[in-house]
Amino acid sequence: MPAHWSLDDIDWDRFDPSKVDPELLKLVKAASLVEHNGGEYTDFLCKVFDGDQAFLTEVRRWGVEEVQHGKALAKWATLADPSFDFDSAFKRFVEGYRPFEEGATSSKRGSRTGELVARCIVETGTSSYYTAISKQAEEPVLAQICKKIAADEFRHYKLFYDHMRRYQKLEGLGRFGRFRVALGRLGETEDDELAYAFYVANTDPATAYDRVRDARNYTSRAFRQYGKEHVMKAAAMMLKAIGVPSNGHLAKAIGNMGWMFLRRRAQTG
Ligand SMILES: [Fe+2]
Ligand SMILES: [Fe+2]
């Protein structure tokens, strides 16, 4: 199955260098590396869900779309900064960051349902992030790319959510188990992957990686992009993934807490 759009659908000739925000450019470079690494995660999911043909067909398309996100963002970043060498940055990124243990064939989330809950959390994060950037970006091509990516990420959430529901019935992972996985995956947001991508994309290799410094550099910029409405929607999507009503007081309270957390992190960069 082909992706929902291609790089040819982007109006590259509308690119306006005078509207490039240098801080947003740093985030886009980092995002291009993480997205492009989706191919490796596809291989991992194919092992975890071996034998589930319906899922594997869809997950291969998902992988193609994630890699395409990386290509579109990298192309934009190179237009904005011709000195950005995506290929060598990506090589450094995959050499320095391993998303899972070599040869892993099962999910560290403990079950297929758990893996799918974790995927829902990731897609919640990406859908809100690209929606936020598409609203923030003044550069028209970046806004267009992020809008298309955000639409894909919402579809990805739905894909993983639908299969998670199916597995949940088979495996019987309850709300508490799903809550634990969601919390665990959420806690990893500030772990190495994004911080390391930010470091590789924006720092001279002669400077050593500093997990705390680079995580702060990343989160302070990334969290600044969000509006409250994006955080409220993300909270509802996360609750839905763990099987809790996503339109009540709890969703509102968690959304408000998330918003306060993001604001604080955004100011401590
Ligand atoms: Fe993506
Ligand atoms: Fe995605």
Image (spheres, rainbow, N blue to C red):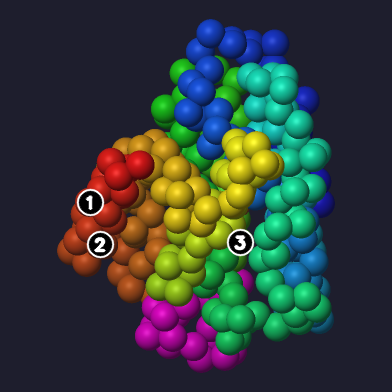
Q: Is residue 99 left or right of residue 212?
A: right
Asked whether mark 2 lies closer than 8 Å to ligand 2, one says: no
Q: Is residue 229 visible?
A: no
Dot 2 or dot 3, earlier in sequence: 3
Vertical relation: 70 (above or below) 194: above
Q: Position of residue 61 (x, y in %)?
A: 76, 54
Kindly state the secondary structure of the residue where label 1 is placed: helix
Q: Position of residue 264 (x, y in %)?
A: 25, 48
- Please identify, in this view, whether the residue under mark 2 or under mark 3 is nearer the observer: 2
Q: Is residue 177 magenta?
A: yes
- Amino acid type of the residue tagged 1 in the rendering: Met
Label pair 3/1, CB-CB below 8 angstroms: no
Q: Looking at the image, which residue is at 58% across and 86% down?
A: 110
Residue 193 position by quadrant = bottom right
- Amino acid type of the residue tagged 2 in the rendering: Ile
Q: Is residue 173 visible?
A: yes
Label pair 2/3, CB-CB below 8 angstroms: no
Dot 1 or dot 2, earlier in sequence: 2
Residue 11 position by quadrant = top right
User: Residue beneath label 3, please?
Assistant: 159
Q: CA distance from mark 2 to mark 3?
A: 24 Å
Dot 3 or dot 1, earlier in sequence: 3
Q: CA distance from mark 1 to mark 2?
A: 10 Å
Q: Main secondary structure of the magenta part?
A: helix
The magenta stretch is: 163-181
Q: CA distance from mark 3 to mark 1?
A: 30 Å
- Please identify, in this view, whether the residue under mark 1 or under mark 2 is nearer the observer: 1
User: Residue beneath label 2, please?
Assistant: 254
Q: Position of residue 85 (x, y in %)?
A: 76, 31
Q: Looking at the image, which residue is at 53% across and 8% down?
A: 18
